[in-house]
Amino acid sequence: MGQVSKVLVVGGGIGGLCAAIALRRQGIGVDLVELKSEWTVYGVGIIQQANVVREMARLGLADDYLKAGFGFSDVGIYDGATGTRLVRIPGKSLVGDQYPANIGMSRLALHELLSRRAMELGAKVTLGMSVESLGQDAQGVDVRFTDGSAGRYDLVIGADGLFSRMRGMLFGDTYTPRFTGQAVWRYNFPRPAEIDHLAHFQGEHGNAGLVPLADDLMYMYVTSHEPDNPYMEQAELAGRMRERLAGFGGLVGKLAEQITDSRQVVYKPMEVIFVAEPWFRGRVVLIGDAVHAATPHLGQGAGMAIEDAVVLSEEIIGEGTLEERLQRFMARRFERCRFIAESSIMAGDKEMERDHSFDRIGLVKKMLEVTAQPI
Ligand SMILES: Cc1cc2nc3c(=O)[nH]c(=O)nc-3n(C[C@H](O)[C@H](O)[C@H](O)COP(=O)(O)OP(=O)(O)OC[C@H]3O[C@@H](n4cnc5c(N)ncnc54)[C@H](O)[C@@H]3O)c2cc1C
């Protein structure tokens, strides 16, 4: 019942920008507000796997993606101590041979691409602004913004991330992010020719990886167990990251010695949240990390946010009442996002327990199978 012709997207991260792009492609009017007054994204890179490349192709972005990033096929799993390869899992493009299975790219490049495209398509983007309050009736949502202005929308999409204020507006303090006990450390390096695939190194205390981002760039990550979520002094980050890499040999061990600039280390405690269904109340719906933030173990958090955006844009132009359309969105998203969230957390838990019987390779294969299914 009722056309959705004007939508407010709250949050200009990966999910919010993809929602703006997908909605504009359907001809729906989009206002997007982003809290930050400048497009800043925390450094290093991101892996976009085959299911994401597929959705990017559907959004008409895959060619730009490929230009801005580094396409690759395989995932190699290595013994961390020696650097010896254990297995190479061949990637499979889900959109045909003209595209690689996976793309690694810098977060900045991804953000520039998505924000430029959203604006080219006519999304009205306002930086340095958020939602002050919401009030809804059967026909629409009245929004008061933090600059004192107001607007009325058919639908509001909260894509404001892990610490979502929109989630608080819908669910009060029922949900708060939980620290899992682990953190991840990242650092950029020039890319050697051999890192033409995602190389994952299984260590004794955590896992490391090398991810190609561009012809001349890659990043390293390492996960660590940080039981009390300690405060990390910025000036000490390089030394601390080297400590976390102490047990690694091979290429990772060699590169560890080059981690000397603490300003270039990106340290992030892992925090998660998972909201029970439905992710909407009336005409306000949440997507992405606001409702299902996972740990990075399976590299699918942004992938799930992007898929949410695509599915939501498809469903809201469908048949039935808005509630029925949003229920169909839930039906297509809930179990898939739950699988990623729970599996990612389990992989981290097994690392912390140092459970050597845990079949990580099997889990990665299962994730690839599940995410290859159409959304
Ligand atoms: C270390 C690490 C590595 C990761 N690696 C990968 C990977 O390789 N592949 C992958 O797919 N995923 C990865 N992820 C997950 C991925 O980064 C997230 O799942 C993804 O960014 C979620 O997108 P989002 O748009 O929902 O939220 P975000 O990207 O967090 O965007 C939220 C946006 O909302 C804005 N905002 C916040 N509050 C407000 C407000 N009140 N009003 C307006 N705007 C607001 C924020 O400024 C931000 O721009 C990783 C995560 C971590 C922590």
Image (spheres, grey):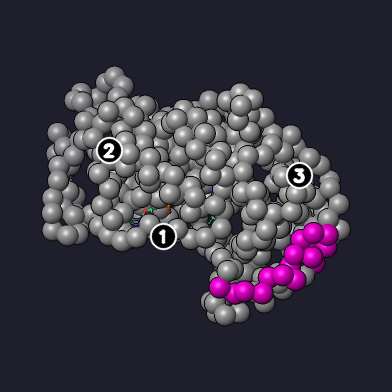
Q: Which residue type carries mark 1?
A: Thr
Per the image, the residue denoted by label 1 is 40
Mark 1 or mark 3: which is in front?
1
Q: Nearer the viewer, residue 347 or 124?
A: 124
Name the residue located 31 percent from the left edge and 36 percent from the top edge.
Answer: 121
Query: Quick check: is the Cβ at mark 2 less than 8 Å away from ligand 1?
Result: no
Per the image, the residue denoted by label 3 is 76
Viewport quadrant of the N terminus: top left
The tag earlier along the polypeptide, 3 or 2, is: 3
Q: Nearer the viewer, residue 288 or 277?
A: 288
Cα separation, mark 1 vs mark 3, equals 32 Å
Q: Which circle marks residue 122 in the picture?
A: 2
Q: Which residue type carries mark 2?
A: Gly
Q: Which residues are magenta?
A: 247-263
Query: How far from the left and from the top, in percent, is residue 29?
Result: 23, 35
Name the residue located 35 percent from the left edge and 26 percent from the top edge.
Answer: 315
Query: Quick check: is the Cβ at mark 3 less than 8 Å away from ligand 1?
Result: no
